[in-house]
Image (spheres, helix red, strand yellow):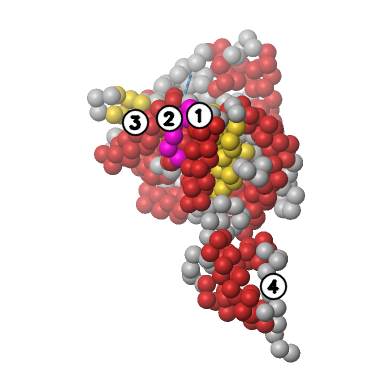
Amino acid sequence: MEAHPSTALLTVLSRFLRGTRYEGHLQTLLECRPDIDRESPEIFFTAVLDAMRSNSDRDALTGLLNTAALEERLISAMAFAKRHGSKVVLLTISILEFRDLRDSLGRKKSDFVLQWLAQQLRTVVRTEDILARDQNDFILGMTVRKAEDVEHIVSKLKDIFSQAVPTLEEHLLISLMIGASVFPNDGDDVDDLLIKSQTAMRRSPGECQYQFFSDEMQKGARDRLQMVQELRDGLERGEFAVYYQPKIDLLTGTILGFEALVRWIRPEKGMVSPGLFIPVAEESGLIVPLGMFVLKTACAQLKQWHSMGYMHLQMAVNVASQQLRDDDIVRVVEEILTTTQLFPDRLELEITESSAMVNVEKTIQLLVALRQRGVQIAVDDFGTGYSSLSYLKRFPITTLKVDQSFVRDLPDDLDSLEIVNAIIAMGRSLGFKTVAEGVETFAQETVLRAAGCHAVQGFLYSRPVPAQEITPLLGKSYR
Ligand code: C2E
Ligand code: MG
Ligand code: MG
């Protein structure tokens, strides 16, 4: 049977467009334009090319405006607003943790989520509004009387996104981050307004709550950017050091091992707290090389203490979620263990509850691979995250670290006491070791011992210090 002319034509056309900027537009175009006559090859071909020309301002995946068209439309909207004394609000809408979502769902499904989101956004905007996609962000430009008029549209979005994405097998709830900048209040340059709206979006709390841009935010963003550069330079110049904090065995009163904690020692500026730079290192991805440096340094140091005869000592190293994204971590750990000849069970990796919840399947797979090689796995800051224990049971955990926020108010605060007792009892019953962090007083130690806690760590015994200050402590008893 002879093929339908338009089908043959379609094949020719898509082959013809392969590798051009129109590739991918064809399908969207056909869906958007059922009116094009597919019976006559000439009419069809001309109509498709015409439509294609006019469609070049569309984003191929979602059919929304692309960024070039967005800019043009915004310029005219701003000119209109100027004449009529109104305002243009620019909303940047983005899915919270979209990159993690993409990592765990794969490209196809996450593209589908973007398409679905585009469709939902279409239903809430007015025809005169400007709606565009810029990679993983959606931009909505609206002419309004006063900036607060966006409230209305945001509340509509809230309704939609309180439900799960309907067509995915996984029960996926989306949390939207929304940022807003306003013409003329925040400026009159499109690029500048877009950046401001994006900056505000990153500061938004998620859950469809929007956040207006403010000047402090820009300062914050500039500071962070500067810190990223300084972190990068600092890494190159070797400004980072590893400090060690002993962990004390409550049964024997001796040091059983250490936690390695990174320090940034800046020439002329002194020591910067990890609380300040770790989040920036995580955001920028620099935590990966930094984390590797800590891991290698700490293992080399442990090897040295082992060769002094303290073979039982163990080393715990904090691992960020970005380090648990690919098999590299397993390879690096294996490499380190081979070159240092350390027993694998002397190395413990600390992950936080929340980092375990990112990209769950991959994280489990990597942790299982590490565990199979004998490495120990601790959950850091346990009790502060949102994971349930039944969930955590899927992870190959060996140790729970009771967060210092529960230890701080011991022994007087009854809530803390109950929580600590429960965590330790539960940890023990599941066969985990328990380590309490942030122990500063003997009274806290007494309560923890009574609760059956295995080990403690805190200023009561030692602050985190450089390796040379640890060496004289190695044989010490803390009883
Ligand atoms: P963390 O892993 O929970 O580490 C324990 C933190 O509690 C350390 O803060 C330690 O100095 C502090 N601490 C220890 N004993 C006491 C005490 O008795 N009282 C009080 N108030 N605090 C105590 P630090 O060194 O400032 O590190 C803060 C956080 O930064 C760490 O929390 C960890 O999440 C992160 N971090 C540190 N080094 C690294 C690293 O190499 N890689 C990664 N990914 N994160 C790191
Ligand atoms: Mg830790
Ligand atoms: Mg901790």
At horizontal 31% and vertical 29% (from top left) the residue drawn is: 265
Q: Earlier in the sequence, mark 3 or mark 1?
A: 1
| Viewer-nearest residue: 105 or 49 | 49
Marks 2/4 in contact by CB < 8 Å: the verdict is no
Relative depth, front residue between 227 and 327: 227
441 shown above or below 362: above
- Asked whether the beta carbons under mark 4 and mark 1 sit within 8 Å of each other, the answer is no
Give the residue at mark 3: 264
Label 3 near label 4: C-beta < 8 Å? no
Left or right position of 87 against 431: left
Q: Amino acid type of disc 2?
A: Gln
Q: Is residue 110 visible?
A: no
Q: What is the span of residues highlighted in magenta in the rendered image?
A: 180-190
Q: Amino acid at mark 1?
A: Phe
**How far apart are labels 1 and 2 at the CA level?**
8 Å
State yes or no: discs 3 and 1 in contact (Cβ < 8 Å): no
- For marks 2 and 4, give the one nearer the viewer: 4
Q: Which mark is residue 213?
A: 1
Find residue 37 and name its label. 4
Q: Dot 1, how many residues are within 10 Å of its Cα: few (below 14), some (14-19), or many (20+)?
A: many
Could one spot residue 269 in this view of the protein? Answer: yes
Residue 351: x percent and y percent?
54, 38
Q: Is residue 182 magenta?
A: yes
Which residue is denoted by mark 2 in the rendering?
A: 218
Please state the horizontal and vertical placement of residue 410, each as a whole percent of the image.
Answer: 60, 14
Write the residue at 35% across / 34% down: 226
- Disc 3 residue type? Trp
* Residue 247 point in image, percent of width and height: 48, 28
- 3D distance between C-alphas at marks 4 and 1: 48 Å
